[in-house]
Every structure is written in structure tokens, then in C-alpha cells.
Image: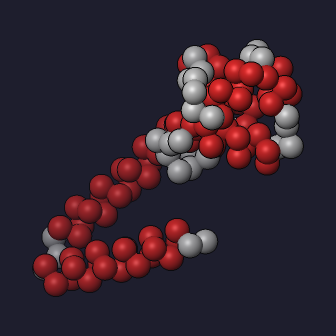
């Protein structure tokens, strides 16, 4: 997941491999190896790349689909979802099933945006 994301973001920013390498302290060949999945960057370089692209390291690694979601925002979203889940659990099973189906439909539509 890292390689394709680095390549996509680099191209979106109209950076060459050399230009990205200059920004993060790597040679063009090292950037190529990362993009092709033949090498993994150090944590330091990963964080530099995240800064250059203005995304989170988790996004680069494929752990998140949100480019700029901070830990505070992520925690807030998780808390709200847990609160909603608690409320849903108090409903009867038919209402729970209806809500679950609605959520699935919403997520499916959102993924098409």
C-alpha cells in the first residue's frame, strides 16, 4: 500500500522522484524502490514523506483512508460511534437490522464518491 500511495501523492504534487528524494533526504533510486515495494523507508523518512504530502503516516501505510485525520479527530469519531452503538444496542432487533442495512447502504454510496 505504501508504494502506490507515495507514487500517487508524488504525481499529484507534480514532484519527480529526485525532487521528493531531495525533500526527504533520499536518492532518486531509493524513492523508486519505495514506490515499487522493494524497500521500506525508515520511520524518520516515512514521517518526512507524510509532512511533504500533508497526510498522516497511517494514510501512507494504508492503515487509514483519511489523509489528514489526526489522532484527536480519530478518537472523537471512535467515541461517537461507540456512543451510537450503545444506543442501537438498546433497540429491538428489527430496528437494529434496519439501521445496520441503512449504514451499509450509506457506506456503499460514500465509497462511490
102 up-or-down from 110: above or below:
below
Q: Who's the residue at 70% across and 41% down the image?
A: 7
The x, y position of residue 110, in whole percent, is 53, 71
Instruction: Quadrant for the C terminus, please.
Output: bottom right
- Picture quadrant of residue 19: top right
Q: Who's the residue at 86% across and 43% down the image?
A: 14
- Picture quadrant of residue 31: top right
The x, y position of residue 35, in whole percent, is 65, 34
Considering depth in this image, is 105 or 1 the residue closer to the camera?
1
Considering depth in this image, is 56 or 86 the residue closer to the camera?
56
From this viewpoint, is residue 84 visible? Answer: yes
The x, y position of residue 80, in whole percent, is 38, 56
Position of 89 with respect to 106 (left or right) is left
2 up-or-down from 95: above or below:
above
51 up-or-down from 100: above or below:
above
The x, y position of residue 9, in whole percent, is 72, 43
Position of 51 with respect to 77 (left or right) is right
From this viewpoint, is residue 72 visible? Answer: no
Considering depth in this image, is 56 or 49 the residue closer to the camera?
49
Q: Who's the residue at 53% across and 41% down the image?
A: 1
Q: Who's the residue at 28% across and 75% down the image?
A: 100
- Picture quadrant of residue 25: top right
25 up-or-down from 11: above or below:
above
Amino acid at each position: 500500500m505504501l508504494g502506490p500511495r507515495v507514487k500517487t501523492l508524488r504525481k499529484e504534487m507534480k514532484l519527480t522522484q529526485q525532487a521528493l528524494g531531495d525533500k526527504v533526504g533520499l536518492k532518486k533510486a531509493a524513492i523508486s524502490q519505495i514506490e515499487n515495494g522493494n524497500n521500506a523507508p525508515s520511520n524518520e523518512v516515512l514521517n518526512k514523506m507524510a509532512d511533504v504530502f500533508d497526510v498522516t503516516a497511517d494514510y501512507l501505510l494504508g492503515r487509514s483512508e483519511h489523509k489528514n485525520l489526526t489522532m484527536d479527530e480519530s478518537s472523537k469519531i471512535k467515541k461517537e460511534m461507540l456512543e451510537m452503538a450503545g444506543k442501537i444496542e438498546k433497540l429491538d432487533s428489527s430496528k437494529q437490522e434496519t439501521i445496520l442495512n441503512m449504514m451499509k447502504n450509506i457506506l456503499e454510496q460514500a465509497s462511490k464518491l
